[in-house]
Each structure stands twice: as structure tokens, then as C-alpha cells.
Amino acid sequence: MTHTVSRTRTRPAKPSVGARFDTALGWSPRLGPNMVLRIVLCVLVFCIFALPFLAIISGAFDRNSSPTDISLLPKSFTLRNFEAATEQGLWGYLLNSLVVAGGGLLLQMTVSVFAAYSLSRKKFRGQALVLLLVLMTMMLPEEIIGIPLSLVLGDLPLLGISLRGSVLAVILPVGIWGFSIFIMSEFMKEIPGEIEEAARLDGVGEFRMLFTIILPLCKPALGVIGIFGFMMVWDQYLLPLIAANDPSDYTLTVALSVLRNDTTVGPGVLLAGALMAMIPSLLVYLFLQRSMIRGITSGATKG
Amino acid sequence: MTATPTKPANTQAPPRPGGPVQQRKARRNNSQLLAIWLFLIPAALLGVYFKFIPMVEGIRLSFFKVQPFLGDVFVGLDNYLAVLTDVRFMEALGHTVILGLTQTLGALVVGFALALLLEGQARSLWILRTTIFLPVVTALAVVGEIWRILYFPTADGPLNSILGWLGLGPLQFLNGTDTALWSIAVVGIWSGAPYNMVIILAGLTGVDRSLYESAGVDGATIWQRLRYITLPALRPSLVIVLTLAAIRSLRSFTEVYVLTGGGPAGSTEVWMTRMYSLGFQRNDIGVASAAAVLLLVVTLLLTVGTQLLAKRKAAR
């Protein structure tokens, strides 16, 4: 916001030049009815979007037995919900989630970087077809192919092994994500060819080219596919559900609904579980927030 | 594409055929070709195993009556007929479209309002923007559990007590057949609007400030300014993002499954939950596969159509 606001008083109907034109709605930076209105609206927005989270945190630490007891501050602070969560094996589910998210994200990023390198820095016969196939994978999310995918996971064609019940049954399917490949190759395309040509004259091979020349220039894109990939894996619901052999294979997000249907556990334990499922994504978001915003806006302009 | 031009050796007119330089180049091209395919192998393997084999298998199953121990029987288009004549699938289709449109449009309107309110470089605004983005980064399953608690249908449930202060009667929310679908839509808007806000904010910063200024000089009202300057500037980037979001919403599953599971009395059954309960709970894999293929074809056509339209517009 520019601070070179003209000191002329705002005349009615004719706003003064300056900060009034910094925002689409012409919010005034000075104290007045306009500012008060904006603050009131901001408080309202905060309540709508953030207070439910405060309620979860409070509920997770509260000695409550029914959703009607939820308040913004715990009435009687307790860690009992987390003890009960331990008894319900929630930490095991959290571990499942973390293993799946870590392994899945690592695989997905590696696969995407490799594929993007080939697709963006090279020209080869059949490239258009490969691009088309990558696009196709984006049209085949777990939801649409869920039923046959669960059959495939139970009996891998040619190999004849079953992945069901193993973390690999979630990690491998999320490894291929067209969105991530596209973001990465869009970014790699922007790197000038001269850099690569110069390195090639020095006799740099393909692997070193990718890891020491190209990748260091792609850090922003790595951040973008990192956070989007994490959100994508963490958000998986149907896949861990069909990949599980028995409920102990569930990830935390899936286990929450099992917990909810268990009448012996109160909402406090459920909220403790929700809090546990929220914290990792919250941390990743706080660290990679810029990448998140960059990813959203670049997607918006590219379409 | 700015990649180095590595044409196949035979298309180049060689100055000295078979010369040492040429040989080295050919060898390099060969090794490059090898590298290209090596780098594509992981994606190809995973894609084949977890995308294309399931897709082909799904299409195949959609033409069969699937019976685990008796063997599959080819039934032609019977499964498709079964889907298209099933009342519950048709109801689910209606719910899917209503839910998709409400969520997409609602998230657009709320996202736009948020962007207008929170536009600016002040640090307090930045903090607020970061905070209200939380619903987007929270897993849908968690969002669902949160809202199930907020929507607790007794008069002293969290949301109902707020409505009580405002003098509004307690609502059944997810438990009422006529409120459940809208309650799900609200959750979708809540978790989708901040995402749109970020897109719209990026668009707002791109609006030429001098246009606002000259509009001010001309005595335009705030409303006219929004209508004739801001909206036209935002439209190109928004239209395609939203169309794609609307198409994606056709296959929304998690929020419905977590919030209501399709109930009460099927009032929130969407295409995906119907398909899921047929395929996994009733083991009617053939019919469920046909429903999946139909969904795939529809989303494919709509997406390709949108992209083509967008390309044609951009080319013009």
C-alpha cells in the first residue's frame, strides 16, 4: 500500500487520488466508517473460516462427551482424549499416513522430475503420444478407476502378487500424477538451452545434467509439486480404503470415520484424531506457503 | 519447446559422411535416445499398472456380468442399460449436478468477496489470508469430521446454537432429507472459496491501477468500477479454472461419503457414492464399472471440449 496518500480530505462522491485506487473496492487506509466496516467484515470472515479449527483444538483437549459441549476454550483441560487415542491405535494410523505420504511424495516427485526432463528438454519420436498418455492419466483419478484398481492391487497382472494391505498399495498408485509432471515440464521448458549445450560440451552425462544443472534451477517448481503432491497424497481417501486388507492398514484420514462409528469413543477422541491429521498438512503448508500460492496462480494463468 | 535440437542423424546433410565428428554425434544421439526412454520408464510402468490396466479392465468388466466363482458372462450393453434405467442413478445424477454447480458457483462468489475484502499489502491482511486458507490445506476427510460435529442436529449443537442467537430455528442439517444436500454444498464452498480467493487476488493485482483512477475522475461508482474494470480483467483466467472445477466436481466422493454416506434416505446420493456402494458393498462390479465408464467418458468429453474452446479463444 502506497503511503504517499494525498492529505486532501475526501470529498463526498469524489474520492481522492491515491490509496483509494489501490484496491478494487477502494478501501480507505484511514480510520473512518469505511475502515470500521472492513474490520467488522474481516472479523466475521475470520470467525467463519478459522473458528471451527479453534473449536477442534479446544475439543481435543476438553473433557467432553457430546458435540454439544464444544466450545472455543476447553472447559476442563485434559489429555485423556489423546490417551484414549493411543488406546484406539491412532498413532499407528498416523504412522501409516506419514509413511504413505513420505514414500508416495518421494516417488511421485522423482517420477515427475524424470518424466518432465525427457518431455521438456528433449525431442523424440512419439513425444506427442507420450504427452497425450500423461494427459490421459489425469483423467483417471482413483475415484473413476477405483473398482478395477482394487482388483489390480489384489493381483498385479504379470507379476501375480498382491499389494493389498501393504503401504505400497497406496504409494505406487499415487506415484504417477500428470499434474506434477506438467508443472515440472512447463518450468523446465523455460530454462535456456545454452546452459545445457555448454555443459554438454564439457562432457556432462544425462544424469549429472539433470541433477547438477537442471534441477538446481527448478527449485521453485520443486516446491510447487512438493506441496501439491503432499496435499494430494494426504487427501487420499478412497485409495487407502480399497488398498487395505484390514482396518489396521488404514491411514489416519480413513480411520477417523471408523472411529466416529464406534459408539464407545466420544467426540473428544475423534477431535484429537482430527487434530493429529491436521498438523502435518499445516506444517507443510506453513513451510511451503509461497510455493502453494505460486502453484495456484500459475495454474490459473495457464489454464 | 526450447530443448536442444537433437535431430536424428540421417536428416542432417553430413559434410563429410562417416567423419569422426559425425560418428560422435550419432553415438551421442543414440545415448540420448536411450536416456529419454530410461527417464520415462518409471512413469510408464506406474501409469500402465495403476492407470491404464485398471482403465482397460474397467471397460472390459462393464460388458460382463461379474460372478466371482461362476465365471464372467458377456452381457453386451446390459450393464449400461441397467445404469441408465436405474432410478437411483438418475437421482444421483441430479444430486451430482446440483451439488457441483452450487459448490462451484458458491465458491466463486464467496472467493470473489473474500478477495475484494482482503486485497492489499498490509501485514494484517496477509496473516488473515494465510489463516483463512486453512480449510483448503486440511484433508477433506478431516473437514468432513469437523463439519459433522458443527452440524450436530440438536438445538444445542454448535451451529444450531449460533442460529439460535439469531432467532433461527434449529436445523436438521445432514440429518434432514431437504437440508442435507445444501449442508454438503456449504462445506464444499467453505473449503473451496479460499482457493478461488488466491486465484482472484492474483488477477486483482494485475488490474491496471490507472483505470481505477480514471474511473474515479469520471465519477464512476464502486459498483460500476467492479462491473466494467475489475470483472472483465478477471474473466479470462477464471472461466477455464471454474469450468474445470465444475467438471471435476462430477466425481466428488470423499466429502459426501464422509458427511452423509449418501443418506438420509438417498437424498445426497451422488454418482460416485452410488457407484461405490454397488461395486464394493453389493459386489455388482459389472454395473458399477459401466457407471465408471460413463463418468469417465462424460468428464473426458467435457474437459477436452473446454480446453479446445479455450485454445480457440486464445488463438483468436
Image (cartoon, coloured by chain):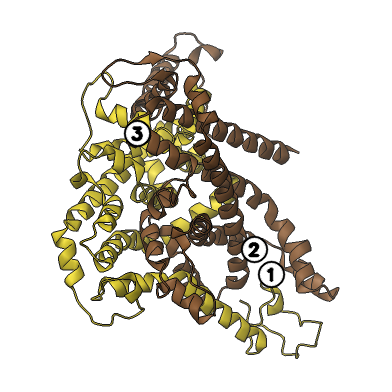
Chain colours: A yellow, B brown
Q: Residue at x 58, y 68 (%)?
A: B114
Query: In the rendered image, is residue B43 in sight?
Result: no
Query: Disc 2 versus disc 1: distance between alpha carbons?
Result: 7 Å
Image disc number at residue B282: 3
| CA neighbours of label 1 inside 10 A, class few (<14), some (14 to 19), many (20+) | many
Q: x, y percentage for residue B160?
A: 46, 73
Q: Which residue is mark 1?
A: A24
Mark yes or no: residue A37 visible: yes
Q: Earlier in the sequence, mark 3 or mark 2?
A: 2
- Give the SS element for disc 2: helix
Residue at 23% across, 76% down:
A63
Asked whether the residues under marks 3 and 2 belong to the same chain, the reply is yes
Pointer 3: residues within 10 angstroms few (<14), some, or many (20+)? few
Q: CA distance from mark 1 to mark 3?
A: 54 Å
Q: Amino acid at mark 2?
A: Leu
SS at circle 1? loop
